[in-house]
Each structure stands twice: as C-alpha cells, then as structure tokens.
Image (cartoon, helix red, strand yellow):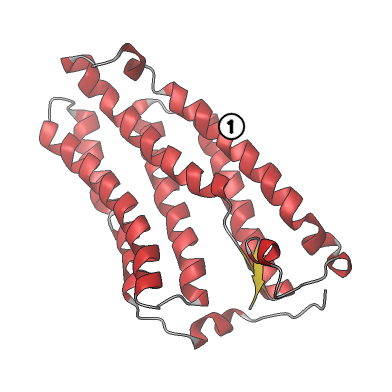
Amino acid sequence: MQIEEKKAKDLFQDRIFTLSNFLSILRVFLLPFFFYSTYDYAKDPSNLSAFFASIGYAIGAVFTDYLDGLFARILHQETTLGRYLDPVCDKLVTLGGLFVVTIHFEFPSWILIVYFIREILGVWLGGFLYLKRGLQGRPNWWGKFGVGIVAISVIWYMSLPYFLQFGAPYPFLMHPVISAYVLLFVLTAGVIAYVVRYWNIVFHPEAIELDPENKKQAKKYQKI
C-alpha cells in the first residue's frame, strides 16, 4: 500500500455547516442538561420530572445519532469531517452518560475505565489512519452495537431508583449490572475485530493492496 499522509486542516476543506454535523454537535450540547437533571434526580429520587427529563435527554441523544447519518445520506451531505465528527461526538456523549451513572447509580467504575481506554485508542487509531495512511476506517457492527448498549445501560441504571420506589414489571430489571457486562463483552469483541482489521495497515502497510473495486475491502476502510 502506498502511504499518503494527510494534515488535520484537510478535514475542513469540505462542507462544515451541514444539518448532519449540527445534529452531531447538538447531542454534545445536551450533556450539561442531562448532567443537571440527573443530579437533581439522584439527589431526590422522588423528583420524577427530573427523572423523565434525564430519560428524554438520553433518548434525544440516541435519536440525533440516528438522524445525523440519515440526513447525511438523504441530503447528500456526507463529508470526511462529518464521518469523523459523528463518532467523536458519540464518544463524548457515551462517556458522559456512563460517568453520570457511575457517580450516581453505581455503574461499575472499572468498566467505565475500560470503556474510556478503548475510546482513547479508537480516537488514536482514527487519527493515525487519516494522518499517516490517508485512510478512513469504517465503523464495525460491534461499535454501533456498543453505542446502543451504552444507551440501554445508562437508562437502565437511572431507572433503578424508580423501580425501587414503584416496582419493576420484570424481576431482572432490578439488576442493571447485566447491561454492564454485556457492554464489556461487546467492547472486547469490538477491540478484537479492530485489531484483526487494522493490524497490518498500522504495522505492515506494505502487505496491503488497496483495490477500489473490492467491495469487501471498502466496508473496512476507504481511501481519502
């Protein structure tokens, strides 16, 4: 593979102000409101307005994550910047959500640390592929699934005080730690998948032959 390095400023040569980019950034701006309402709810679990507000912010973040990609495709607003902005915003929001439930609702702190390390490595890998290889990595299904599991886990942990007050419709809902360990499994599988996919590109680029017509290869990464 011929190595082509890029510069960070190259990201901004395409369109910046698009609806999809706005939606990506919007969910980051939801974080302070989520923090505030969740703090009120954790301080007083009987404050159901704060509880439902927090749930609403969490669902809103998930919804914008779906909409930004949808609008990018429908409105033909797919850009290199947008393809990086979306996962970076995802990382900020998911880390923020897990941090809140770790502080207030006893989410396992060591899983949060594992998740944080994994996301830092993901940012490094994405930056390395772009700056040093001129490639853009494609997200795998484990990563997409992981974002969904984070959302479920955050809402589940936040709902535990509510279930303790009013009862849970199903007994297993009293054990949100299930979602934490499912998340850990997904994280592990995702890391393994990324290592298999990108090991040679990072350490042995000479062993890779890029073929623009190879659809299977295009699902993993693309030339920028």
Location of residue 63 in the rendering, given as x and y in whole percent from the top left corner: 30, 53
Q: Amino acid at mark 1?
A: Phe
Location of residue 3 in the rendering, given as x and y in whole percent from the top left corner: 79, 77
Location of residue 49 in the rendering, given as x and y in whole percent from the top left corner: 11, 37
- Compare residues 171 and 26 and report the one nearer the observer: 171
> What residue lies at 24% left-to-right and 48% top-to-bottom?
57
Residue lying farthest top?
171
What quarter of the picture does the N terminus occupy? bottom right
| For residue 174, side relative to residue 161 (left or right) | right
> What residue lies at 60% left-to-right and 46% top-to-bottom?
118
Q: Secondary structure at mark 1?
A: helix
Q: Quadrant of residue 188?
A: top right
- Compare residues 48 and 204 and report the one nearer the observer: 204
The relative height of residue 19 versus residue 190 in the rendered view (above or below) is below
The relative height of residue 16 versus residue 222 in the rendered view (above or below) is below
What quarter of the picture does the C terminus occupy? bottom right
> What residue lies at 73% left-to-right and 73% top-to-bottom?
132
Please name the residue that numbered disc 1 is placed on.
185
Location of residue 131 in the rendering, given as x and y in whole percent from the top left corner: 68, 74
